[in-house]
């Protein structure tokens, strides 16, 4: 990092305005919190990653950008800017002005130790970055300590003989304690003192010198079971045991090394090894970022604190294809940085190949200056805006593309960069001791006489309301089920999406804190499965989208401040995976514990003024039993995302309503699409003797509320058109069974030249798709295999390019019950609040809260102390009449517990990774109009509900 600049650096000519970009970057390298007021400088911030690209030639679309290998020199030249010459006379040497590292695709990273070579390039890459950052610390700024990163590295390097899990765990504990023992040994000076004092006092001094180290070593061994809970969350482990998480991390790493050593690895095993390698990289990078965040902000009493205002700089000069080192590092950075709270790592890279899909689009072009010349300062202003937003805590994207003009600058830019250095390493001063002395003095005063007074003041100014009662229980699956208001200390997050859930609960707590509990208010509970068990690798984040929509609606409702209005307080209730713990007894035959979340809601109905429950999100006997239990308490339930026919028939209580169409309507629309769609016919041909292609229906025969019900209804509607082949596939199948199912499906599709009707749960679609993608029969077809799904995997819908990248042999058509306006106020507000695109799940949660708020405001005008049963009565009569919401036109009353002729769309993910709408039927929110025909020229009739 302290090498001399390249020989041709002075001949380097930069794009127009690049020196302004350098000034912006210099400002935040020198002070990562530049622009923040002094009183707010403890606020967590995350530095953005800038990916330099070129503006395209010609008159192309605004915001476009192109990679350019020539930008590598710009990044390397900036690295030389962070090095200066110091010393006197002939003893001058190069010093670093800010810690920085370079990831070089050409030069392999230097590991030093032989075991690093055997650890794999993915580990060696991050180890080399950490080494460079440590070596480039500015003079007299202290050493860079990386305790979490080095501990993880020691786990991966450990030479432990194979054995059972307990033996490996004990060996790992012993190795880590031996590694840390050197830090706890007495110093040489204490040994010299012991030798100088004879007799019993020498023995006493020797014991006093050894005892602290022995106690610290013992405490360290005990802490190995209570450290690094973040690593366990990343690896899907329960509890806080570092040893358990370390053993899982080591197993993933060993599996990757074994596959790398294999000459002809199996495709599936290679895919799993690539996933394990990505997990190891993410854990190591997370540990490094956590260490850097602590190093950037030492303890308040540290004399190094004023000197560490700079950012840690990482340079990626060649962000090329997916196999390059720079690209792998950037992929890992983008995957982990959204879960890190504060990160002082500033990443600057040059795009030399295709731009990554996760990189945020460049800002829109500004109007050219007079005379037609391009705006040379546009890129500088864009960089300044990105850094200001990130430092203020408003940045949502991890990586941003910054397009540079193609117009060259005047003169040689390298000379200008060398002359105008803005980064300075702050010298050490005597006043640096003022802060630690003052901090220690203040702490001593507070501990001596202020602790009791502090507690009294906290009790006076921050009382805990009686309504904030924690209701959460840990269950055998490792999940925490129950309900929370976001500020009662109940953590319901568990599984792969736990960080996302915690962010939503924090938002919930902030919004609930603004509700005045001393004035009339009502509480709505969002009730759904929001976690997965420790043994499961599946999750259904659709519930998170519904919750995001509900949170947005709560904020907007409470911000209206109308004269006669009921403020809405929102609780979140987690029923656990498969809604297992949402109810007890009755229709719920699987919950053998004493945990009943629906009963928890009933018990808090009076204390929290609970008026209604929304969500459920899944059609299961367990969720219907929960609706029944809530109905006995007179609490209205408004289901979102629920489609099983039994949910609205048979055992459905009078207090139950839902916003989504049931299976009968969904099956009829999907059968009509399969019968007539020209787009589907492009992948499937009519069977001999039939007017339509064969349908291979994948369903779960044990899932009677949703999967089996939808499959049989589709069979009844479609059998007159083409043959129907039923293929059972359980929701809880293991990998071997999944492979056999994929083989059966692909053989049937290849033999009949038909299509797949996927009637399974969204959480298991991506279990089946990889096996279908690699099946010989599916890949042997002339065209792609068409899959028509009622409940697609949410990640495929939110990121449609994944289909083209991972499942090129398949074509996905999917059902969607609404289509929010992409340019409407709801979509814009949702994107501004959460940084995500809105779709029907988010719209359903949004509409549920708004519908209940309108109903409660109407009741409140005549009955300010209304009970939950009053809301049930209102929804039955007068009900909701053609409410135009974001999830469609909604009518609910005593005769309609779901909206009749509900809006339905069939959408397709094209080979280019875009989404198009092939079918639209029902009462549309767009223009509040009824669509009765679909297809080219409106040739086909839309199915209509029997009861209107």
Image (spheres, grey):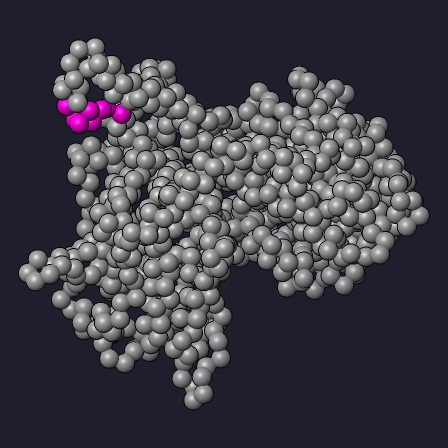
41 or 485, nearer to the observer: 41
Q: Position of residue 316 (x, y in %)?
A: 30, 55
Q: Position of residue 803 (x, y in %)?
A: 49, 48
Residue in the picture at 45% in, 84% down: 369
| Number of residue marks | 0
Q: Main secondary structure of the magenta part?
A: helix
| Farthest bottom residue in view | 371
| Farthest left residue in view | 90
552 or 837, nearer to the observer: 552
Query: Is 185 on the left or on the right of 372, as rendered?
Result: left
Residue in the picture at 6% in, 60% down: 90
| Farthest top residue in view | 200
Query: Is 144 on the left or on the right of 539, as rendered?
Result: left
**Is 602 located above or below residue 938 in the figure?**
above
Residue in the picture at 28% in, 43% down: 144
- Please say whether residue 785 is visible from this viewpoint: yes
Residue in the picture at 63% in, 35% down: 456
Residue range (magenta): 184-192
Q: Residue 656 lies in what quarter of the image?
A: top right
171 or 222, nearer to the observer: 222
Q: Position of residue 202 (x, y in %)?
A: 19, 15
198 or 852, nearer to the observer: 198
């Amino acid at each position: 990092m302290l090498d001399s600049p390249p020989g041709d650096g002075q001949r380097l000519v930069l794009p127009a305005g690049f020196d302004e970009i350098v000034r912006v970057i210099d400002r935040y390298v020198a002070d990562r919190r530049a622009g923040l007021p002094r009183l707010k400088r403890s606020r967590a911030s995350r530095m953005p990653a800038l990916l330099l690209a070129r503006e395209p030639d010609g008159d192309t679309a605004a915001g476009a950008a192109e990679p350019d290998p020539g930008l590598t020199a710009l990044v390397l030249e900036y690295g030389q800017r962070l090095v200066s010459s110091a010393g006197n006379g002939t003893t001058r040497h190069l010093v670093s002005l800010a810690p920085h590292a370079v990831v070089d695709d050409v030069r392999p990273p230097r590991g030093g130790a032989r075991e690093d070579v055997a650890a794999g390039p993915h580990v060696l890459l991050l180890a080399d970055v950490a080494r460079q950052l440590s070596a480039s610390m500015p003079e007299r700024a202290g050493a860079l300590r990386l305790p979490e990163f080095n501990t993880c590295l020691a786990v991966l390097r450990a030479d432990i003989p194979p054995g059972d899990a307990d033996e490996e765990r004990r060996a790992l504990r012993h190795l880590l304690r031996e590694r840390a023992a050197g830090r706890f040994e007495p110093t040489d000076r204490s040994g010299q003192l012991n030798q100088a004092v004879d007799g019993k006092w020498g023995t006493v001094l020797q014991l006093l010198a050894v005892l602290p180290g022995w106690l610290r070593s013992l405490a360290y061994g005990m802490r190995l079971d209570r450290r690094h809970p973040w690593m366990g969350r990343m690896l899907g482990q329960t509890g806080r045991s570092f040893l358990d998480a370390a053993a899982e991390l080591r197993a993933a790493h060993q599996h990757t090394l074994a596959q790398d050593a294999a000459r002809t690895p199996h495709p599936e095993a290679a895919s799993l090894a690539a996933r394990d390698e990505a997990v190891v990289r993410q854990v190591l990078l997370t540990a490094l970022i956590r260490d850097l965040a602590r190093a950037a902000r030492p303890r308040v009493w540290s004399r190094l604190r004023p000197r560490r205002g700079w950012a840690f700089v990482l340079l990626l000069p060649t962000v090329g294809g997916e196999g390059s080192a720079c690209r792998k590092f950037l992929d890992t950075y983008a995957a982990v940085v959204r879960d890190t709270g504060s990160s002082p790592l500033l990443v600057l890279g040059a795009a030399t190949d295709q731009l990554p899909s996760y990189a945020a689009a460049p800002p829109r072009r500004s109007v050219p200056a007079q005379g037609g010349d391009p705006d040379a300062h546009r890129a500088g202003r864009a960089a300044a805006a990105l850094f200001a937003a990130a430092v203020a805590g408003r940045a949502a994207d991890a990586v941003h593309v910054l397009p540079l003009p193609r117009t060259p600058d005047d003169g040689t830019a390298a000379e200008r960069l060398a002359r105008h250095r803005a980064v300075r390493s702050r010298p050490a001063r005597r006043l640096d001791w003022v802060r630690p002395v003052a901090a220690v003095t203040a702490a001593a005063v507070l501990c001596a006489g202020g602790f009791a007074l502090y507690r009294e003041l906290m009790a006076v100014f921050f009382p805990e309301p009686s309504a904030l009662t924690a209701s959460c229980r840990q269950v055998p699956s490792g999940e925490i089920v129950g309900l929370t208001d976001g500020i009662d200390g109940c953590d319901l997050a568990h599984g792969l999406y736990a960080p996302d859930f915690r962010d939503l609960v924090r938002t919930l707590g902030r919004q609930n804190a603004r509700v005045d509990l001393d004035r009339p208010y009502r509480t709505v509970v969002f009730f759904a499965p929001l976690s997965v068990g420790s043994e499961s690798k599946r999750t259904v984040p659709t519930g998170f989208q519904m919750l995001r929509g509900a949170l947005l609606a709560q904020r907007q409702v409470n911000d209206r401040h109308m004269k006669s209005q009921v403020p809405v307080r929102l609780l979140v209730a987690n029923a656990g995976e498969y809604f297992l713990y949402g109810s007890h007894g009755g229709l719920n035959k699987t919950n053998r514990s004493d945990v009943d979340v629906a009963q928890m809601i009933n018990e808090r109905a009076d204390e929290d003024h609970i008026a209604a429950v929304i969500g459920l999100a899944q059609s299961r006997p367990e969720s219907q039993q929960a609706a029944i239990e809530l109905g006995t308490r007179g609490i209205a339930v408004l289901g979102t995302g629920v489609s099983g026919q039994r949910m609205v028939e048979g055992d459905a209580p009078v207090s139950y309503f839902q916003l989504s169409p049931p299976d009968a309507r969904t099956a009829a629309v999907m059968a009509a699409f399969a019968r007539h769609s020209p787009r589907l016919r492009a992948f499937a041909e009519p069977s001999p003797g039939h007017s339509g292609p064969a349908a291979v229906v994948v369903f779960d025969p044990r899932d009677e509320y949703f999967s089996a019900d939808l499959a049989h209804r589709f069979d009844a509607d479609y059998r007159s058109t083409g043959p129907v082949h039923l293929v059972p596939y359980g929701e809880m199948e293991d990998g071997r069974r999944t492979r056999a199912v994929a083989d059966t499906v692909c053989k049937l599709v290849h033999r009949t030249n038909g299509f797949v009707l996927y009637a399974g749960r969204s959480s298991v679609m991506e279990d089946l798709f990889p096996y279908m993608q690699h099946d010989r029969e599916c890949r042997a077809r002339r065209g792609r295999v068409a899959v028509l799904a009622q409940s697609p995997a949410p990640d495929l819908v939110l990121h449609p390019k994944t289909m083209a990248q991972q499942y090129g042999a398949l074509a996905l058509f999917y059902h969607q019950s609404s289509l929010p306006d992409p340019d409407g106020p709801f979509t814009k507000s949702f994107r501004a609040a959460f940084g995500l695109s809105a779709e029907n799940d988010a719209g359903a949660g949004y509409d549920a809260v708004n519908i209940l708020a309108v109903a409660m405001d109407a009741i409140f005008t005549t009955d300010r102390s209304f009970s939950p049963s009053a809301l049930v009565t209102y929804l039955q009569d007068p009900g909701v009449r053609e409410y135009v919401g974001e999830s469609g036109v909604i009518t609910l009353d005593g005769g309609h517990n779901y909206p009749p002729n509900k809006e339905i769309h069939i959408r397709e993910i094209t080979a280019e990774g875009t989404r198009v709408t092939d079918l639209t039927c029902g009462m549309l929110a767009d223009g509040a109009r009824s669509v009765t025909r679909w297809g080219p020229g409106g040739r086909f009739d839309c199915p209509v509900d029997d009861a209107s």
